[in-house]
């Protein structure tokens, strides 16, 4: 094997908080070789982004590098001066960030931002820089030179913004590309296109890539080798197929078991507990508190990396050599679908619903407005105790439909009957009573939870609005937290003191606290780790079984939908293009668009996929 392009040796990084050092990365060793893709996976807080920022020497001011070196071309990036780093960043090592909305400059056109890299690192100017900018945009499959270069970031879709970020990273012709969760916020079709683009570009430009993600299935599509991080430590590293099919670490096996399958209705298994941090001076396995195979020795001994056959595969586990069976997801519990025919009267019945947005009124309301139909002629029935999933890519009208069902948006046409009463006809008092029995959980809990309020205030807020006595509110809030797996100790915490999974559980508790009959779930697991996602899905099914409520699940993730939905409604451009049982739609789709959605879902190697018959 050739010499590594980039080499991390014994890297330990901590953050100084409140006078103490909190470890983020501990004794990390990793080498990146020419023309290879290394995937780095792990839950939130595992140290993935810290390691990536260290590779660019972009660590924040409170980061303390306690030990280690990061070598590129004989230069230690952790100790290089600013002039040296300026020559390497963007030119030799480039980074693609998770959120292009915040990474792109909103006050510059995307063409100017790409050209800036060409001027700075390659000395181009004028027509030459403009021509190369157009070439790069075509390379990332944005072939509209009359519009794209002169557009500002906000004028492009999320997928287009991510392609611009990739073009900027490629502009300096780097040897190494660092990709930090580049597909996390994208819908399944755009994600598939970005993964295909990265795969194609890798063949063309021959750069080495570090692909960081919590989406194990996405990493599996690209990586030659996979490294698994937990609590800042490298738990496993080896050839991708070997790691995925013969994992040598219990944590890796837990991540794999948490990945949902689109082809089989089997509930994924979450990893118990929450990610921990290594405690300085304590010699034990960092995963010991969550590991179902832990022994007494694991609590007194920190394991070293052990090499597994056939070579090139290492695992940090005291029992790694004796415990790396092939992963078999068929052991997961199956989930029974509900039979709608058992109910004669649906909880919710929607008939020919349409929703419009009005645009173009001009300054001061002058000018002629025109209506844009975001949802058109949608009909469905939702029985009690069942789950209806509404799927489709971004812009298909899913969230607009969800908000219209709760009268958070006005409907232009149609009927929305809840327990036989059209909610479009309700007066203010009746609407308030309806909203006690119908709740919504939004996609992003960080933005939907008031940062200035405690968990107790957040969860109890619906009770305040519905006139529940003060003495009863805290008790019911505590009960709601208990139902979602959080203890009463969380009542006094603020949202910033919670992990992403804990925030989503608080959002669910707020929705459950009024004991609603209908809960609209708008992408409730999109931004979560697969292990947290699996726990949330299990929680939702437990709550449904306990209370008999019904869910309307908005999602673009068909693998998640397959695990919990009884029926599926597929939307495109505001219209329903297919509807039926989850079994029918997701294993034998009849519409070409549904086939396209299914084909875009990433999966792990060795799994069989459903046979999609577009002719049926």
Image (spheres, rainbow, N blue to C red):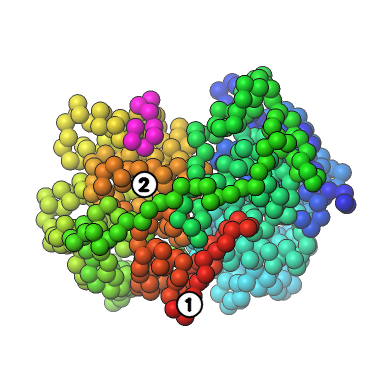
Element type at mark 1: loop
Q: Nearer the viewer, residue 584 or 278?
A: 584
Q: Is residue 486 above or below residue 93?
A: above
336 or 472: nearer the viewer = 336
Is residue 379 part of the magenta span, yes or no?
no
Name which residue lies at 59% across and 58% down: 607
Question: Disc 2 marks which residue?
Answer: 541
Quadrant location of the C terminus in the rendered image:
bottom left
Residue at 30 percent of width and 73 percent of height: 376
The magenta segment is 482-489
Q: Quadrant of residue 34?
A: bottom right
Between discs 2 and 1, the one toward the N terminus: 2
Which residue is disc 1 drawn over?
Answer: 614
Q: Secondary structure at mark 2?
A: helix
Closer to the camera in the image, 408 or 200: 200
Residue 182 in sight here = no
Q: Is residue 24 left or right of residue 27?
A: left
Q: Hey, which quadrant is residue 606 in on the image?
A: bottom right
Residue 562 percent coordinates (x, y): 44, 58
> Looking at the rendering, which quadrant does residue 58 occupy?
top right
**Label 2, label 1: how many angstroms apart (C-alpha)?**
31 Å
Left or right of 84: which side holds 192? left
Name the residue rendered at 75%, 68% in the picture: 204
Expressed as whole percent of the image width and height from the top left, the position of residue 420 reads: 14, 60
- 15 above or below 203? above
Count the numbered circles shown.
2
Pointers 2 and 1 in contact (CB under 8 A)?
Answer: no
Residue 461 shows up from this direction? yes
Q: Position of residue 533 (x, y in %)?
A: 47, 46
Question: Few, some or many C-alpha atoms within 10 Å of disc 2 (few <14, some 14-19, many ≥20)?
Answer: many
The image position of residue 385, as x and y in percent, is 27, 52
Badge 1, how many Cα within 10 Å: few under 14, some, many 20+?
some
């Amino acid at each position: 094997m050739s010499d590594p392009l980039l080499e991390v040796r014994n890297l330990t990084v901590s953050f100084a908080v409140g006078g103490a050092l909190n470890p983020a990365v501990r004794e990390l060793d990793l080498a990146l070789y020419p023309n290879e893709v290394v995937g780095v996976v792990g839950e939130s807080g595992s140290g993935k982004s810290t390691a990536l920022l260290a590779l660019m020497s972009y660590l924040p001011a409170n980061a303390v590098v306690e030990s280690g070196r990061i070598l590129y071309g004989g230069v230690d990036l952790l100790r290089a001066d600013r002039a040296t780093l300026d020559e390497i960043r963007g030119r030799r090592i480039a980074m693609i960030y998770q959120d292009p909305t915040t990474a792109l400059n909103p006050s510059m056109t995307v063409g100017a931002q790409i050209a800036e890299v060409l001027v700075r690192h390659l000395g181009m100017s004028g027509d030459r820089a403009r021509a190369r900018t157009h070439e790069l945009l075509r390379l990332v499959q944005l072939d509209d030179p009359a519009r794209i270069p002169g557009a500002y970031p906000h004028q492009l879709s999320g997928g287009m913004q991510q392609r611009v970020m990739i073009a900027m990273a490629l502009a300096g012709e780097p040897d190494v590309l660092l990709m930090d969760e580049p597909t996390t916020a994208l819908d399944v079709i755009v994600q598939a296109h970005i993964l295909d683009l990265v795969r194609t570009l890798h063949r063309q430009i021959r750069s080495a890539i570090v692909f960081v993600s919590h989406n194990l299935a996405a990493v599996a599509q690209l990586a030659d080798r996979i490294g698994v991080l937990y609590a800042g430590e490298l738990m496993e590293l080896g050839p991708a197929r070997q790691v995925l099919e013969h994992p040598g670490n219990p944590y890796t096996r837990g991540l794999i078991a948490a990945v949902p399958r689109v082809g089989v209705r089997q509930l994924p298994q979450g990893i118990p507990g929450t990610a921990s941090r290594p405690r300085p001076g304590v010699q034990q396995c960092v995963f010991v508190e969550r590991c179902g195979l832990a022994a007494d020795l694991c609590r007194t001994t920190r394991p070293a990396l052990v090499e597994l056959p056939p070579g090139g595969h290492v695992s940090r586990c005291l029992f790694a050599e004796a415990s790396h069976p092939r992963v078999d997801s068929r052991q997961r519990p199956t989930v029974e679908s509900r039979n709608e025919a058992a109910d004669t009267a649906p909880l919710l019945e929607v008939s020919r619903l349409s929703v419009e947005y009005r645009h173009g009124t001009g300054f001061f309301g002058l000018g002629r407005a025109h209506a844009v139909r975001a949802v058109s002629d949608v009909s469905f029935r939702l029985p009690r105790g069942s789950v209806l999933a509404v799927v489709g890519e971004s812009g298909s009208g899913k969230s607009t439909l969800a908000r219209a069902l709760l009268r958070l948006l006005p409907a232009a046409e149609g009927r929305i009957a809840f327990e036989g009463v059209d909610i479009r006809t309700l007066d203010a008092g009746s609407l308030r009573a309806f909203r006690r029995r119908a709740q919504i959980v939004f996609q992003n809990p960080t933005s939907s939870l008031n940062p200035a309020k405690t968990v107790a205030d957040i969860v109890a807020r619906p009770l305040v609005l519905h006139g529940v006595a003060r003495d009863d509110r805290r008790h019911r809030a505590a009960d709601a937290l208990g139902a979602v797996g959080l203890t009463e100790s969380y009542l006094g915490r603020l949202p910033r003191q919670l992990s992403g999974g804990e925030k989503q559980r608080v959002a669910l508790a707020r929705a459950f606290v009024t004991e609603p009959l209908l809960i609209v779930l708008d992408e409730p697991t999109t931004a979560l780790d697969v292990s947290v996602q699996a726990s949330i899905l299990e929680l939702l099914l437990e709550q449904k079984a306990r209370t008999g409520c019904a869910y309307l699940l908005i999602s673009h993730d068909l693998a998640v939908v397959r695990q919990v939905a009884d029926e599926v409604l597929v939307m495109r451009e505001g219209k329903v293009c297919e509807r039926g049982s989850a079994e029918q739609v997701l294993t034998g789709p009849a519409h070409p668009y549904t086939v396209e959605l299914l084909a875009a879902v990433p999966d792990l190697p060795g799994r069989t996929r459903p046979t999609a018959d577009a002719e049926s």
